[in-house]
Image (tube, coloured by chain):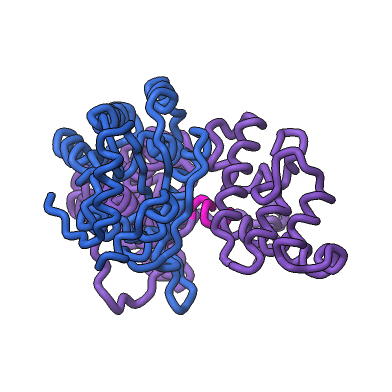
Protein backbone atom coordinates (compact mmCIF):
# COMPACT_ATOMS: atom_id res chain seq x y z
CA UNK A 1 0.00 0.00 0.00
CA UNK A 2 1.26 3.46 -0.88
CA UNK A 3 1.90 5.60 2.13
CA UNK A 4 0.30 9.01 2.18
CA UNK A 5 1.89 10.08 5.43
CA UNK A 6 4.03 13.18 5.32
CA UNK A 7 5.30 12.71 8.84
CA UNK A 8 8.95 11.76 8.49
CA UNK A 9 9.24 11.02 12.21
CA UNK A 10 6.54 8.35 12.00
CA UNK A 11 8.08 6.86 8.87
CA UNK A 12 11.44 6.71 10.59
CA UNK A 13 9.93 5.10 13.69
CA UNK A 14 8.20 2.45 11.56
CA UNK A 15 11.40 1.76 9.67
CA UNK A 16 13.38 1.49 12.91
CA UNK A 17 10.86 -1.02 14.24
CA UNK A 18 10.64 -2.97 10.98
CA UNK A 19 13.71 -5.08 11.61
CA UNK A 20 12.94 -5.79 15.25
CA UNK A 21 10.58 -8.08 17.12
CA UNK A 22 6.97 -8.15 15.93
CA UNK A 23 4.61 -5.70 17.65
CA UNK A 24 0.95 -6.51 17.19
CA UNK A 25 -1.88 -4.14 18.01
CA UNK A 26 -5.57 -4.99 17.75
CA UNK A 27 -8.44 -2.64 16.95
CA UNK A 28 -11.93 -3.76 17.97
CA UNK A 29 -15.27 -2.00 17.73
CA UNK A 30 -18.81 -2.54 16.48
CA UNK A 31 -20.19 -1.33 13.14
CA UNK A 32 -21.11 2.09 14.53
CA UNK A 33 -17.72 2.68 16.06
CA UNK A 34 -15.90 4.07 13.01
CA UNK A 35 -13.53 1.10 12.86
CA UNK A 36 -13.39 1.01 9.06
CA UNK A 37 -12.51 4.71 8.93
CA UNK A 38 -9.75 4.18 11.47
CA UNK A 39 -8.35 1.20 9.55
CA UNK A 40 -8.35 3.36 6.41
CA UNK A 41 -6.50 6.10 8.32
CA UNK A 42 -3.92 3.57 9.55
CA UNK A 43 -3.28 2.44 5.98
CA UNK A 44 -3.12 6.04 4.79
CA UNK A 45 -0.53 6.82 7.46
CA UNK A 46 1.66 4.04 6.06
CA UNK A 47 1.36 1.81 9.11
CA UNK A 48 1.19 -1.93 8.29
CA UNK A 49 -2.32 -3.14 8.93
CA UNK A 50 -4.55 -6.11 8.17
CA UNK A 51 -6.87 -5.14 5.30
CA UNK A 52 -10.15 -6.90 5.98
CA UNK A 53 -11.19 -9.04 8.91
CA UNK A 54 -11.34 -12.67 7.73
CA UNK A 55 -14.71 -13.29 9.40
CA UNK A 56 -16.62 -11.52 6.62
CA UNK A 57 -15.62 -13.83 3.79
CA UNK A 58 -15.87 -16.95 5.94
CA UNK A 59 -19.36 -15.90 7.03
CA UNK A 60 -20.42 -15.35 3.40
CA UNK A 61 -19.02 -18.77 2.46
CA UNK A 62 -20.80 -20.61 5.28
CA UNK A 63 -24.04 -18.76 4.60
CA UNK A 64 -23.83 -19.70 0.92
CA UNK A 65 -23.08 -23.33 1.67
CA UNK A 66 -25.90 -23.68 4.20
CA UNK A 67 -28.40 -21.60 2.25
CA UNK A 68 -29.76 -20.21 5.51
CA UNK A 69 -28.81 -18.39 8.69
CA UNK A 70 -26.07 -19.98 10.79
CA UNK A 71 -27.67 -21.97 13.58
CA UNK A 72 -26.09 -22.72 16.93
CA UNK A 73 -24.85 -26.09 15.70
CA UNK A 74 -23.12 -24.41 12.74
CA UNK A 75 -21.23 -22.04 15.00
CA UNK A 76 -18.40 -24.34 15.97
CA UNK A 77 -17.24 -24.89 12.38
CA UNK A 78 -17.56 -21.21 11.57
CA UNK A 79 -15.71 -20.09 14.74
CA UNK A 80 -12.89 -22.57 14.22
CA UNK A 81 -12.40 -21.43 10.65
CA UNK A 82 -12.30 -17.79 11.71
CA UNK A 83 -9.84 -18.68 14.47
CA UNK A 84 -7.62 -20.48 11.98
CA UNK A 85 -7.59 -17.38 9.76
CA UNK A 86 -6.69 -15.14 12.71
CA UNK A 87 -3.87 -17.47 13.74
CA UNK A 88 -2.54 -17.48 10.16
CA UNK A 89 -2.60 -13.67 10.13
CA UNK A 90 -0.81 -13.61 13.46
CA UNK A 91 1.94 -16.05 12.60
CA UNK A 92 2.58 -14.56 9.14
CA UNK A 93 3.84 -11.38 10.79
CA UNK A 94 7.49 -11.72 11.73
CA UNK A 95 8.95 -8.25 12.29
CA UNK A 96 7.91 -4.71 13.13
CA UNK A 97 4.62 -3.03 13.84
CA UNK A 98 1.28 -4.30 12.56
CA UNK A 99 -2.31 -3.45 13.37
CA UNK A 100 -5.05 -6.08 13.31
CA UNK A 101 -8.71 -5.64 12.47
CA UNK A 102 -10.01 -7.68 15.43
CA UNK A 103 -8.04 -10.43 17.10
CA UNK A 104 -8.09 -14.00 18.32
CA UNK A 105 -9.93 -13.32 21.63
CA UNK A 106 -12.91 -11.91 19.69
CA UNK A 107 -13.99 -15.55 19.61
CA UNK A 108 -14.84 -15.46 23.34
CA UNK A 109 -17.46 -12.78 22.75
CA UNK A 110 -18.99 -14.57 19.77
CA UNK A 111 -19.17 -17.86 21.64
CA UNK A 112 -20.82 -16.13 24.60
CA UNK A 113 -23.28 -14.32 22.33
CA UNK A 114 -24.48 -17.67 20.99
CA UNK A 115 -24.51 -19.36 24.39
CA UNK A 116 -21.46 -21.51 23.68
CA UNK A 117 -18.44 -22.12 25.86
CA UNK A 118 -15.06 -21.22 24.38
CA UNK A 119 -13.42 -24.05 22.45
CA UNK A 120 -10.19 -25.68 23.58
CA UNK A 121 -8.65 -24.41 20.33
CA UNK A 122 -9.54 -20.82 21.23
CA UNK A 123 -8.16 -21.19 24.74
CA UNK A 124 -4.93 -22.64 23.34
CA UNK A 125 -4.56 -19.96 20.65
CA UNK A 126 -5.22 -17.21 23.20
CA UNK A 127 -2.43 -18.59 25.38
CA UNK A 128 0.06 -18.99 22.53
CA UNK A 129 -0.57 -15.90 20.42
CA UNK A 130 -0.45 -12.71 22.46
CA UNK A 131 -0.96 -9.19 21.18
CA UNK A 132 0.92 -6.19 22.52
CA UNK A 133 -2.03 -3.83 22.92
CA UNK A 134 -5.78 -3.83 22.41
CA UNK A 135 -7.68 -0.69 21.41
CA UNK A 136 -11.45 -0.60 21.82
CA UNK A 137 -13.38 1.97 19.82
CA UNK A 138 -16.37 3.46 21.61
CA UNK A 139 -19.53 3.84 19.51
CA UNK A 140 -19.80 7.10 17.58
CA UNK A 141 -23.49 7.42 18.40
CA UNK A 142 -25.42 6.64 21.54
CA UNK A 143 -27.75 4.16 19.78
CA UNK A 144 -30.65 6.26 20.98
CA UNK A 145 -32.91 8.56 19.06
CA UNK A 146 -34.34 11.80 20.45
CA UNK A 147 -37.39 9.92 21.74
CA UNK A 148 -35.14 7.58 23.68
CA UNK A 149 -36.06 4.61 21.54
CA UNK A 150 -33.31 2.05 21.45
CA UNK A 151 -33.56 -0.22 18.44
CA UNK A 152 -33.32 -3.91 19.13
CA UNK A 153 -30.70 -4.21 16.39
CA UNK A 154 -28.55 -1.52 17.99
CA UNK A 155 -28.95 -3.02 21.43
CA UNK A 156 -27.76 -6.35 20.10
CA UNK A 157 -24.75 -4.72 18.45
CA UNK A 158 -23.87 -3.12 21.78
CA UNK A 159 -24.42 -6.42 23.57
CA UNK A 160 -22.09 -8.45 21.37
CA UNK A 161 -19.50 -5.67 21.47
CA UNK A 162 -19.53 -5.69 25.28
CA UNK A 163 -19.16 -9.47 25.25
CA UNK A 164 -16.14 -9.16 22.96
CA UNK A 165 -14.58 -6.57 25.28
CA UNK A 166 -15.17 -8.94 28.19
CA UNK A 167 -13.49 -11.68 26.15
CA UNK A 168 -10.29 -9.63 26.09
CA UNK A 169 -10.45 -9.20 29.86
CA UNK A 170 -11.01 -12.95 30.19
CA UNK A 171 -7.95 -13.46 27.99
CA UNK A 172 -5.87 -11.38 30.41
CA UNK A 173 -5.69 -8.10 28.47
CA UNK A 174 -6.30 -4.55 29.73
CA UNK A 175 -7.88 -2.90 26.68
CA UNK A 176 -7.36 0.80 26.01
CA UNK A 177 -10.61 2.59 25.22
CA UNK A 178 -10.54 5.10 22.39
CA UNK A 179 -13.14 7.83 22.76
CA UNK A 180 -15.47 8.73 19.86
CA UNK A 181 -13.70 11.22 17.59
CA UNK A 182 -12.55 11.72 14.02
CA UNK A 183 -10.43 8.87 12.65
CA UNK A 184 -7.30 11.04 12.47
CA UNK A 185 -7.67 12.13 16.09
CA UNK A 186 -8.22 8.56 17.21
CA UNK A 187 -5.12 7.42 15.34
CA UNK A 188 -3.12 10.20 16.99
CA UNK A 189 -4.36 9.00 20.38
CA UNK A 190 -3.42 5.40 19.59
CA UNK A 191 0.05 6.37 18.33
CA UNK A 192 0.67 8.49 21.42
CA UNK A 193 -0.31 5.53 23.54
CA UNK A 194 2.24 3.40 21.67
CA UNK A 195 4.91 6.13 21.91
CA UNK A 196 4.85 6.60 18.16
CA UNK A 197 4.91 10.03 16.46
CA UNK A 198 1.40 11.29 15.69
CA UNK A 199 0.58 10.90 11.99
CA UNK A 200 -1.27 14.23 11.87
CA UNK A 201 1.83 16.15 12.91
CA UNK A 202 3.32 15.75 9.45
CA UNK A 203 0.19 16.69 7.54
CA UNK B 1 -12.40 -8.32 42.83
CA UNK B 2 -12.54 -11.71 44.50
CA UNK B 3 -15.47 -14.14 44.81
CA UNK B 4 -15.61 -13.41 48.56
CA UNK B 5 -15.84 -9.64 48.06
CA UNK B 6 -18.39 -9.66 45.23
CA UNK B 7 -21.96 -8.85 46.25
CA UNK B 8 -24.50 -11.39 44.95
CA UNK B 9 -26.79 -8.56 43.78
CA UNK B 10 -23.99 -7.43 41.48
CA UNK B 11 -23.22 -10.95 40.30
CA UNK B 12 -26.90 -11.44 39.38
CA UNK B 13 -27.03 -8.41 37.08
CA UNK B 14 -28.01 -9.34 33.49
CA UNK B 15 -24.81 -7.85 32.11
CA UNK B 16 -22.64 -9.91 34.45
CA UNK B 17 -24.45 -13.21 33.95
CA UNK B 18 -24.36 -12.70 30.17
CA UNK B 19 -20.61 -12.01 30.16
CA UNK B 20 -19.64 -14.93 32.38
CA UNK B 21 -18.08 -17.86 30.54
CA UNK B 22 -19.99 -20.13 32.93
CA UNK B 23 -22.91 -18.26 34.56
CA UNK B 24 -23.33 -21.04 37.12
CA UNK B 25 -19.79 -20.60 38.38
CA UNK B 26 -19.17 -17.90 41.00
CA UNK B 27 -15.56 -17.37 39.96
CA UNK B 28 -16.61 -16.92 36.35
CA UNK B 29 -19.27 -14.35 37.31
CA UNK B 30 -16.74 -12.55 39.51
CA UNK B 31 -14.33 -12.35 36.57
CA UNK B 32 -17.15 -10.93 34.44
CA UNK B 33 -17.98 -8.35 37.13
CA UNK B 34 -14.31 -7.42 37.36
CA UNK B 35 -14.08 -6.99 33.58
CA UNK B 36 -17.31 -5.01 33.44
CA UNK B 37 -16.21 -2.65 36.20
CA UNK B 38 -12.79 -2.19 34.62
CA UNK B 39 -14.46 -1.43 31.31
CA UNK B 40 -16.90 1.05 32.84
CA UNK B 41 -14.16 2.80 34.82
CA UNK B 42 -11.85 2.90 31.80
CA UNK B 43 -14.66 4.68 29.93
CA UNK B 44 -15.74 6.92 32.85
CA UNK B 45 -16.92 9.98 30.96
CA UNK B 46 -16.28 12.67 33.61
CA UNK B 47 -12.72 13.70 32.78
CA UNK B 48 -12.16 15.51 36.09
CA UNK B 49 -13.22 12.64 38.31
CA UNK B 50 -12.23 9.64 36.16
CA UNK B 51 -8.83 9.07 37.87
CA UNK B 52 -10.51 9.43 41.29
CA UNK B 53 -13.19 6.89 40.41
CA UNK B 54 -10.58 4.46 39.14
CA UNK B 55 -8.45 4.87 42.26
CA UNK B 56 -11.46 4.37 44.50
CA UNK B 57 -12.12 1.01 42.84
CA UNK B 58 -8.49 -0.10 43.00
CA UNK B 59 -7.30 0.76 39.51
CA UNK B 60 -4.25 2.99 38.84
CA UNK B 61 -3.22 5.34 40.42
CA UNK B 62 -4.19 2.88 43.20
CA UNK B 63 -2.50 -0.48 43.40
CA UNK B 64 -3.84 -3.97 44.02
CA UNK B 65 -4.18 -4.84 47.70
CA UNK B 66 -4.55 -1.28 48.99
CA UNK B 67 -7.35 -0.81 51.49
CA UNK B 68 -10.20 1.65 51.13
CA UNK B 69 -8.56 4.31 53.30
CA UNK B 70 -5.48 4.41 51.09
CA UNK B 71 -7.52 4.28 47.89
CA UNK B 72 -9.75 7.09 49.15
CA UNK B 73 -6.71 9.26 49.90
CA UNK B 74 -5.37 8.64 46.40
CA UNK B 75 -8.77 9.35 44.88
CA UNK B 76 -9.17 12.59 46.86
CA UNK B 77 -5.72 13.73 45.77
CA UNK B 78 -6.49 12.84 42.13
CA UNK B 79 -9.67 14.90 42.28
CA UNK B 80 -7.98 17.79 44.12
CA UNK B 81 -10.16 17.52 47.23
CA UNK B 82 -9.46 17.30 50.93
CA UNK B 83 -10.05 13.66 51.93
CA UNK B 84 -12.99 14.23 54.34
CA UNK B 85 -14.79 16.45 51.87
CA UNK B 86 -14.17 13.81 49.21
CA UNK B 87 -15.54 11.01 51.39
CA UNK B 88 -18.68 12.91 52.37
CA UNK B 89 -19.55 14.82 49.23
CA UNK B 90 -17.81 13.38 46.18
CA UNK B 91 -17.41 9.67 46.79
CA UNK B 92 -21.16 8.93 47.16
CA UNK B 93 -21.81 10.62 43.81
CA UNK B 94 -19.05 8.67 42.10
CA UNK B 95 -20.35 5.39 43.53
CA UNK B 96 -23.88 6.35 42.48
CA UNK B 97 -22.68 7.05 38.95
CA UNK B 98 -20.89 3.70 38.71
CA UNK B 99 -24.01 1.96 40.05
CA UNK B 100 -26.13 3.75 37.44
CA UNK B 101 -23.72 2.68 34.70
CA UNK B 102 -23.95 -0.92 35.90
CA UNK B 103 -27.75 -0.78 35.79
CA UNK B 104 -27.71 0.78 32.31
CA UNK B 105 -25.35 -1.98 31.22
CA UNK B 106 -27.66 -4.62 32.72
CA UNK B 107 -30.56 -3.09 30.82
CA UNK B 108 -28.67 -3.55 27.56
CA UNK B 109 -28.39 -7.25 28.35
CA UNK B 110 -32.05 -7.82 29.14
CA UNK B 111 -33.44 -10.66 27.10
CA UNK B 112 -35.37 -9.29 24.16
CA UNK B 113 -37.16 -12.39 22.91
CA UNK B 114 -40.41 -11.61 24.72
CA UNK B 115 -40.44 -7.93 23.78
CA UNK B 116 -41.76 -6.79 20.41
CA UNK B 117 -39.29 -4.45 18.68
CA UNK B 118 -40.33 -0.84 19.19
CA UNK B 119 -40.98 1.04 16.00
CA UNK B 120 -40.51 4.71 15.18
CA UNK B 121 -40.70 6.70 11.96
CA UNK B 122 -37.47 6.24 10.02
CA UNK B 123 -36.22 9.61 8.89
CA UNK B 124 -33.04 8.33 7.29
CA UNK B 125 -31.99 5.16 5.55
CA UNK B 126 -30.29 2.66 7.85
CA UNK B 127 -27.75 0.80 5.74
CA UNK B 128 -26.27 -2.41 7.16
CA UNK B 129 -22.45 -2.21 7.26
CA UNK B 130 -20.47 -5.05 5.65
CA UNK B 131 -19.62 -6.71 8.93
CA UNK B 132 -20.60 -10.12 10.36
CA UNK B 133 -21.68 -8.22 13.51
CA UNK B 134 -24.20 -6.23 11.56
CA UNK B 135 -25.32 -9.11 9.35
CA UNK B 136 -26.07 -11.27 12.35
CA UNK B 137 -28.02 -8.69 14.28
CA UNK B 138 -29.88 -7.41 11.21
CA UNK B 139 -30.97 -10.96 10.46
CA UNK B 140 -32.01 -11.39 14.07
CA UNK B 141 -34.17 -8.28 13.91
CA UNK B 142 -35.68 -9.47 10.61
CA UNK B 143 -36.71 -12.75 12.24
CA UNK B 144 -37.87 -11.01 15.40
CA UNK B 145 -40.07 -8.71 13.29
CA UNK B 146 -41.51 -11.69 11.38
CA UNK B 147 -42.21 -13.47 14.66
CA UNK B 148 -44.03 -10.54 16.21
CA UNK B 149 -45.97 -9.75 13.06
CA UNK B 150 -47.24 -13.35 13.09
CA UNK B 151 -48.07 -13.19 16.81
CA UNK B 152 -50.00 -9.94 16.45
CA UNK B 153 -51.85 -11.26 13.37
CA UNK B 154 -52.93 -14.28 15.42
CA UNK B 155 -53.92 -12.04 18.31
CA UNK B 156 -56.08 -9.91 16.01
CA UNK B 157 -57.97 -12.96 14.68
CA UNK B 158 -58.45 -14.48 18.15
CA UNK B 159 -59.89 -11.16 19.30
CA UNK B 160 -62.14 -11.11 16.23
CA UNK B 161 -63.56 -14.52 17.18
CA UNK B 162 -64.45 -13.33 20.69
CA UNK B 163 -65.98 -10.16 19.23
CA UNK B 164 -68.29 -11.99 16.79
CA UNK B 165 -69.30 -14.39 19.58
CA UNK B 166 -70.07 -11.41 21.80
CA UNK B 167 -72.15 -9.87 18.97
CA UNK B 168 -74.12 -13.14 18.84
CA UNK B 169 -73.28 -13.53 15.15
CA UNK B 170 -74.51 -16.59 13.27
CA UNK B 171 -72.72 -19.91 13.56
CA UNK B 172 -71.35 -19.67 10.00
CA UNK B 173 -69.74 -16.27 10.68
CA UNK B 174 -68.23 -17.47 13.93
CA UNK B 175 -66.89 -20.63 12.30
CA UNK B 176 -65.35 -18.70 9.40
CA UNK B 177 -63.64 -16.30 11.80
CA UNK B 178 -62.46 -19.18 13.99
CA UNK B 179 -60.88 -20.89 10.98
CA UNK B 180 -59.05 -17.69 10.07
CA UNK B 181 -57.84 -17.50 13.66
CA UNK B 182 -56.65 -21.12 13.48
CA UNK B 183 -54.68 -20.32 10.32
CA UNK B 184 -53.05 -17.22 11.84
CA UNK B 185 -52.39 -18.94 15.16
CA UNK B 186 -50.80 -21.95 13.47
CA UNK B 187 -48.68 -19.67 11.27
CA UNK B 188 -47.51 -17.83 14.40
CA UNK B 189 -46.59 -21.14 16.02
CA UNK B 190 -44.60 -22.15 12.93
CA UNK B 191 -42.82 -18.80 13.05
CA UNK B 192 -42.14 -19.20 16.80
CA UNK B 193 -40.61 -22.64 16.17
CA UNK B 194 -38.46 -21.23 13.40
CA UNK B 195 -37.34 -18.32 15.59
CA UNK B 196 -36.54 -20.30 18.71
CA UNK B 197 -34.71 -22.98 16.72
CA UNK B 198 -32.45 -20.41 15.10
CA UNK B 199 -32.00 -17.85 17.86
CA UNK B 200 -32.96 -19.27 21.23
CA UNK B 201 -32.22 -23.00 21.30
CA UNK B 202 -32.56 -24.27 24.84
CA UNK B 203 -33.59 -20.83 26.06
CA UNK B 204 -36.23 -20.01 28.64
CA UNK B 205 -38.77 -19.15 25.99
CA UNK B 206 -40.13 -21.97 23.86
CA UNK B 207 -42.51 -21.69 20.90
CA UNK B 208 -45.54 -22.50 23.04
CA UNK B 209 -44.73 -19.73 25.53
CA UNK B 210 -44.37 -17.30 22.63
CA UNK B 211 -47.58 -18.29 20.86
CA UNK B 212 -49.49 -18.17 24.17
CA UNK B 213 -48.92 -14.40 24.05
CA UNK B 214 -51.36 -14.18 21.12
CA UNK B 215 -54.27 -15.11 23.35
CA UNK B 216 -56.47 -17.97 24.55
CA UNK B 217 -57.10 -20.88 22.20
CA UNK B 218 -59.21 -24.04 22.54
CA UNK B 219 -57.49 -27.09 24.05
CA UNK B 220 -55.94 -29.34 21.42
CA UNK B 221 -53.92 -32.51 21.69
CA UNK B 222 -50.21 -32.35 20.90
CA UNK B 223 -50.87 -34.21 17.63
CA UNK B 224 -53.63 -31.76 16.64
CA UNK B 225 -51.39 -28.78 17.45
CA UNK B 226 -48.63 -30.24 15.27
CA UNK B 227 -51.07 -30.92 12.45
CA UNK B 228 -52.34 -27.31 12.51
CA UNK B 229 -48.79 -25.99 12.55
CA UNK B 230 -47.72 -28.14 9.61
CA UNK B 231 -50.70 -26.98 7.57
CA UNK B 232 -49.79 -23.29 8.07
CA UNK B 233 -45.99 -23.58 7.77
CA UNK B 234 -44.10 -22.15 4.84
CA UNK B 235 -46.37 -19.14 4.34
CA UNK B 236 -49.45 -21.17 3.36
CA UNK B 237 -52.48 -19.09 2.36
CA UNK B 238 -55.81 -19.49 4.16
CA UNK B 239 -57.09 -21.53 1.21
CA UNK B 240 -54.05 -23.81 1.27
CA UNK B 241 -54.38 -24.19 5.04
CA UNK B 242 -58.05 -25.18 4.78
CA UNK B 243 -57.31 -27.57 1.90
CA UNK B 244 -54.48 -29.22 3.84
CA UNK B 245 -56.84 -29.91 6.73
CA UNK B 246 -59.75 -31.08 4.59
CA UNK B 247 -61.25 -34.15 6.20
CA UNK B 248 -59.73 -33.43 9.65
CA UNK B 249 -63.17 -33.24 11.23
CA UNK B 250 -62.04 -34.02 14.76
CA UNK B 251 -59.45 -31.27 14.71
CA UNK B 252 -61.89 -28.76 13.19
CA UNK B 253 -64.53 -29.56 15.78
CA UNK B 254 -62.08 -29.34 18.68
CA UNK B 255 -61.01 -25.87 17.58
CA UNK B 256 -64.41 -24.42 16.63
CA UNK B 257 -66.44 -26.02 19.42
CA UNK B 258 -63.87 -24.75 21.90
CA UNK B 259 -65.06 -21.24 21.10
CA UNK B 260 -68.75 -22.15 21.33
CA UNK B 261 -68.28 -23.66 24.77
CA UNK B 262 -69.11 -21.33 27.67
CA UNK B 263 -65.97 -19.71 29.03
CA UNK B 264 -64.91 -21.13 32.37
CA UNK B 265 -65.30 -18.58 35.14
CA UNK B 266 -64.67 -18.67 38.87
CA UNK B 267 -68.41 -18.87 39.61
CA UNK B 268 -69.23 -21.37 36.84
CA UNK B 269 -69.83 -24.07 39.44
CA UNK B 270 -72.52 -21.91 41.07
CA UNK B 271 -74.18 -21.35 37.68
CA UNK B 272 -74.22 -25.07 36.91
CA UNK B 273 -75.77 -25.84 40.28
CA UNK B 274 -78.42 -23.17 39.69
CA UNK B 275 -79.11 -24.59 36.23
CA UNK B 276 -79.46 -28.09 37.60
CA UNK B 277 -81.89 -26.80 40.24
CA UNK B 278 -83.89 -25.07 37.51
CA UNK B 279 -83.41 -21.64 39.09
CA UNK B 280 -81.38 -20.10 36.25
CA UNK B 281 -83.42 -17.95 33.91
- Is B60 or B199 nearer to us in this picture? B60
- Is B152 or A63 nearer to us in this picture? A63
| Quarter of image, res B25 | top right
Q: Residue at x 62, y 43 (%)?
A: B33
Q: Is residue A104 above or below residue B246?
A: above
* Total numbered circles: 0
Name the tint of chain B in the rendering.
purple
Q: Is residue B260 visible?
A: no
Residue B32 in the figure: left or right of residue A59: right
Looking at the rendering, the stretch of residues picked out in magenta corresponds to B106-114
Residue B113 shown in magenta: yes
Dominant secondary structure (helix, strand or loop) of the stretch shown in magenta: loop
In the picture as drawn, the residue positioned furthest to the right comes out as B84
From the top left corner, tell me how far across and down residue A19 is, in percent: 26, 34
Residue B32 in the figure: left or right of residue B138: right
From the top left corner, tell me how far across and down residue B156 is, in percent: 39, 65
Q: Which image quarter holds the C terminus of chain B?
A: bottom right
Amino acid sequence: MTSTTTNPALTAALQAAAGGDPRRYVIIGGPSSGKDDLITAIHAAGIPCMAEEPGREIYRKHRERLGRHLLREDRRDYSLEVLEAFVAEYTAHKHGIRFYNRGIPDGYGWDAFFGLRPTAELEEATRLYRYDAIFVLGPLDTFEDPDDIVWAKDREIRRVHELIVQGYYDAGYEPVFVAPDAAAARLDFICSNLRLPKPSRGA
Amino acid sequence: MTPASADTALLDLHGIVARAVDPADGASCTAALDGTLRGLLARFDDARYAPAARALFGLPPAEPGQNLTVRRELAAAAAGHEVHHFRKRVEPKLVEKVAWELLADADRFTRLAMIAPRLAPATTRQPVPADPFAWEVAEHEEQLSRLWSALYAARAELLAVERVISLEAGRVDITTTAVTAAWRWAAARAEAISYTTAFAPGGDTGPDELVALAGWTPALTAAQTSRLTEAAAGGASREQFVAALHGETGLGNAWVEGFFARPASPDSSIESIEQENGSAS
